[in-house]
Amino acid sequence: MKKKRVDTGKKAKIKQRKSYSQEDTWLEEFDVRSATGNVLSKKEETRTMIKLGEAPKEMNLQFGRVMAVGGRTWYVQSDEEVIECLPAGTVYALHEDTSLLAVGDMVGFERIDDGTGIVKGSVIQVEKRFSHLSRKGIGKYAGEQVIISNVDSILIVMSAADPFYNKRLLDRYLIAAELGKLTPSICINKIELMDKNLIAEDLAVYSDTLNIPIYFTSVAEGIGIKELAAGLNNHSTVLSGPSGVGKSSLINAISGEELQRTGEVSERTWKGKHITSSARMFALPGGGFIADTPGLRELGLWDIHPDDTAFYFHDFDAFFPKCKFTSCTHRHEPDCAVKKAVEEELIDPERYVSYLQIVESLEE
């Protein structure tokens, strides 16, 4: 099968593309509702002209951070107030990502007085992003989908059971975190449902070999919440993982407030019900921010070539320089040091299977 490299070339100076909500692209089964509660259909979406570069200085913009999204409304915090904003007809972008706007973005906006008494605004400029969590789009949105931007770390949340944690998905998250310049940590919630020691042993490659912090928590029994809150303080962290693992419950427990709705796991499919339908950011009592995101059933990787995948499996680092061929893919070549290390159990066999599956998916 012929391999295709990801195009990373310069975009055109002026681009026109559809402005879409996060819910439209992440979770097709969700209605997209505006702040007024009206459904925003795809036919009602408007087109926005994007220009690369800064907006004219004479526009005298105010700046703030996107904290949440609802339909086409982006909620921007500026100083002590939150402004309901819509994208302007022309938006100036200092980044070249496919997703024009994302929760976490720093934006420049103009205030709008429409006589309603509600503070509203129009987003004119989107600042450069220093980090992001993104995935490959699904359906007709085949480009990069930025889930959240401008946070410094990611807490990958999974549950001990109901539903069981997924190491294949966990490995994809670790690659996405490195691509997006995010420091990863792992949280295994609902630990009351399983033997903690067995899970810690099963995940030892992440804690012992990759040196990734792992938190074991139970919102139901109050286990590990203080330790997790301490680890998140003074950081801006996105919580991401499958549905039903308890991300919203963790946020409520950490903050001490009922900030997010929570839902039960569907017994029919053993998958969580989507309760969080868009990304939202919250201030932590001890300083910093946390962001909740919709549960992801899959995480397609963006901007990575199959031949480069091994460089993101750092438990391979000590071995692949010893391979006979410098271009070794660690799959079928003779005298492969990585395969030998797997056979000798110096590399976790399940991590190697994850590697093979990810490479195959990138070649499709």
Image (tube, rainbow, N blue to C red):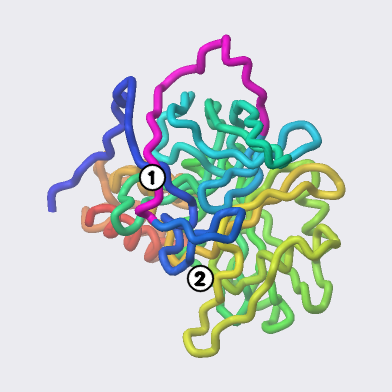
Residue bounds of the magenta highlight = 42-64
Can you name the residue that lies furthest to the bottom here? 268
Identified at 78% across, 78% down, the residue is 220
199 to the left or right of 282: left
Q: Is residue 34 magenta?
A: no
Q: Residue at x 29, y 54 (%)?
A: 140
* Residue 318 shows in the view: no
Could you classify mark 2 by the number of other residues whose Cα lies within 10 Å: few (under 14), some (14-19), or many (20 or more)?
few
Q: Is residue 29 above or below residue 192?
A: above
In the image, farthest residue toward the left? 1
Label 1 packing within 10 angstroms: few (<14), some (14-19), many (20+): some
In depth, the one of 95 and 190 nearer the eye is: 95
Dot 1 falls on a residue whose secondary structure is: strand
Q: Amino acid at mark 1?
A: Glu
- Quarter occupied by residue 162: bottom right
Residue 60, percent from left and from top: 63, 15
* Residue 170, placed above or below residue 81: below
